[in-house]
Image (cartoon, rainbow, N blue to C red):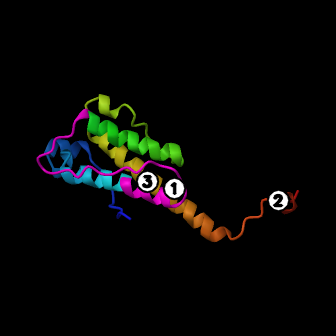
């Protein structure tokens, strides 16, 4: 199974104005985003959810992302959400590829990935602490 890489979600106007590394979308950012998408889809598939495998492209320094690439990323995240659950605080990313993405759009993509992972972790924790489920009528008290 792939490894989770902590997302970068704190890009800001300061980064843009100061031209810090966060002001630019690097191959390493795209590889982290696509790797985290693959991690989530693999993890959910192992838990019985049905998500088509979402393989990362494997970006290099000379690659330039196109609209179709960003659409693939956003659609992959939305496929995970459709198969699993929309996390609290989800930001709609469906229109990102058709606009000129900015730092807040990339933050939204990575924040959504982090929110899905947090939701999965919470679900797993709830299963571990709940013990045996009793869903019959005899288990309901009024």
Bounds of the magenta span?
Answer: 38-67
Q: CA distance from mark 2 to mark 3?
A: 32 Å
Q: For the residue labelled by badge 3, is the local secondary structure a helix, a strand or a loop?
A: helix
Q: Position of residue 122 (x, y in %)?
A: 54, 61
Relative to residue 21, is residue 102 drawn left or right? right
Say which residue label 1 marks.
Answer: 119
In front of the other: 38 or 93: 38
Who is closer to the viewer here, 107 or 139? 139
Crowding near the residue tagged with mark 2, few <14, some 14–19, many ≥20 C-alpha atoms within 10 Å: few
Q: Secondary structure at mark 1?
A: helix
| Mark with earlier residue (1, 2) | 1
Q: Is residue 89 visible?
A: no
For mark 1, does the 10 Å Cα neighbourhood hold few (<14), some (14 to 19), or many (20 or more) residues? some
Left or right side of 53 for 8: left
Q: CA distance from mark 1 to mark 3?
A: 14 Å
State which quarter of the image contains the C terminus: bottom right
Tell me the element at label 2. loop
Q: Residue at x 43, y 36 (%)?
A: 92
Residue at 44% x, 41% y is 78
Q: Which residue is mark 2?
A: 136
Instruction: Residue 48 in the image: state x and y as whole percent.
Output: 55, 57
- Reply above or below: 4 against 129: above
Q: Is residue 40 magenta?
A: yes
The secondary structure that dominates the magenta segment is loop
Question: Gap between marks 1 and 2, in whole Å?
Answer: 27 Å
| Magenta run includes residue 63 | yes
State the mark number for residue 41: 3
Q: Residues within 10 Å of mark 3 (few under 14, many from 20)?
A: many
């Amino acid at each position: 199974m792939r490894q989770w890489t902590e997302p970068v979600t704190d890009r800001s106007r300061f980064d843009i104005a100061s031209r810090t590394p966060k002001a630019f979308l690097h191959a390493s950012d795209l590889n982290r985003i696509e790797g985290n998408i693959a991690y989530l889809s693999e993890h959910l598939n192992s838990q019985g959810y049905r998500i088509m495998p979402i393989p990362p492209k494997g970006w290099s320094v000379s690659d330039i992302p196109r609209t179709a690439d960003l659409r693939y990323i956003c659609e992959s995240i939305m496929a995970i959400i459709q198969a699993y659950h929309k996390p609290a605080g989800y930001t709609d990313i469906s229109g990102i590829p058709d606009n000129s993405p900015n730092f807040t759009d990339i933050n939204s993509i990575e924040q959504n990935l982090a929110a899905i992972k947090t939701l999965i972790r919470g679900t797993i924790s709830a299963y571990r602490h709940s013990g045996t489920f009793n869903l019959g009528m005899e288990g309901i008290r009024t």
